[in-house]
Amino acid sequence: MLKQAKVAILGLGAIGSPLAIYLASAGVGYIRLIDRDLVELSNIQRQILYEEKDTVEWKPKATAAKEKLERVNSDIVPEARFEDFNPATAEELVADVDLVLDGTDNLEARFLLNEVCVKNNIPFIYGAAIEDYGAVSFIVPGETPCLRCIIPELPEPGSLPTCETAGVLGPAPGVVGMIEAAEAIKYFVGFGELLRSKLLYFDLSSLSFEIIDVHRNPNCPTCVREEFPLLNREIKQSTISTLCGRNAVQISPKADLGLNLQALGENLRKNPEFEVKKLTGDLLVVEHGGLSIAITPSGRAIVRNTNSEKRAKSVLSRIISC
Ligand SMILES: [Zn+2]
């Protein structure tokens, strides 16, 4: 049964790491590994999919995770997707799987995941951790409360603690990932009780675990009224976001730019202001003025060593117009 199971793990950080390893070890046949970021040294402290050597090779987390899972279990098929989860990519990234597992690090991505799973009738397991706390719930569209029934509104930006403002105790997201893995295995094998219409909440500082009953909102905009504003949001311009807990900025173009990275990299090599650190068909990494810039063929870029969106955008425009 596990061999036939197809899952997607969205986010390969501290929750996604143990989750991926347990599902691969258990023999879940197909695991789609989705993450937009590269491995860096500060990840190693709690993101147990990765090793130091991955950080010096400028490796996408999705690629490093795939290689790790292939070493763990050669009978399974891991697929790496080094992509941003946004309204343009969301439906394709979770298409054709039986279950989606939440390893994201922010509520906005989870609300988008909720919309895409409700719209396409895909069960998913919500999981989140902050400081010493964690929460998990098993969401089956049309049957259990959806995430929007449990958390009615997206809080104002900056009003909630994030891993950037509050930090996180390394094992707390690990516990969330392991509980998600246990739920997934029980679901596919068909035993035990699942966290359907229930929210597990734990606090590692006091070691309390409690399960709360949650209920469908009869007027839920997502699972009752079937409104999907995040998913239907039109992308009119490139989006810029700072990455949680990181000194880095991501810039996503409004549409796929279809860059020829090889040609771009060769061109940059002629300019002494830029140092090309890595050049493959799907990733170009360049250093310039203390910043390192990783660019994918779609034109999506991660600019490290800055939190300034303006600075990141200015350096990227120099590279892409080069
Ligand atoms: Zn709902």
Image: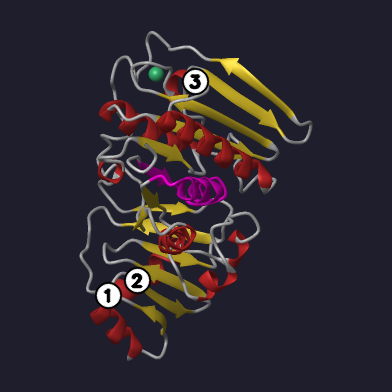
In this rendering, the answer to whether 135 lies above or below 13 is above
Disc 3 + disc 2, Cβ < 8 Å: no
Q: Percent x, y for residue 8?
A: 37, 44
- Quadrant position of residue 219: top left
Residue occupying image coordinates x 59% and y 42%: 162
The residue to which callout 1 is attached is 261
Q: Residue 194: give its label.
A: none
In this rendering, the answer to whether 92 lies above or below 192 is below
Determine whether, in the image, residue 68 is placed left or right of residue 161: left
Residue type of the residue flagged with mark 2: Leu
Which region is colored magenta?
Answer: 6-28
Who comes first in sequence, dot 2 or dot 1? 1
Quadrant, the C terminus: bottom left
In this rendering, the answer to whether 200 lies above or below 18 is above
- Return the residue nearer the eye: 113 or 157: 113
View extreme (right): residue: 206
Secondary element under disc 3, as helix, strand or loop, is helix
Secondary element under disc 2, as helix, strand or loop, is loop
Query: Is the CB of mark 3 within 8 Å of ligand 1?
Result: yes
The residue to which callout 2 is attached is 283
Disc 2 + disc 1, Cβ < 8 Å: yes
Who comes first in sequence, dot 3 or dot 2? 3
Residue type of the residue flagged with mark 3: Ile
Q: In this figure, what is the number of numbered marks?
A: 3
The residue to which callout 3 is attached is 150
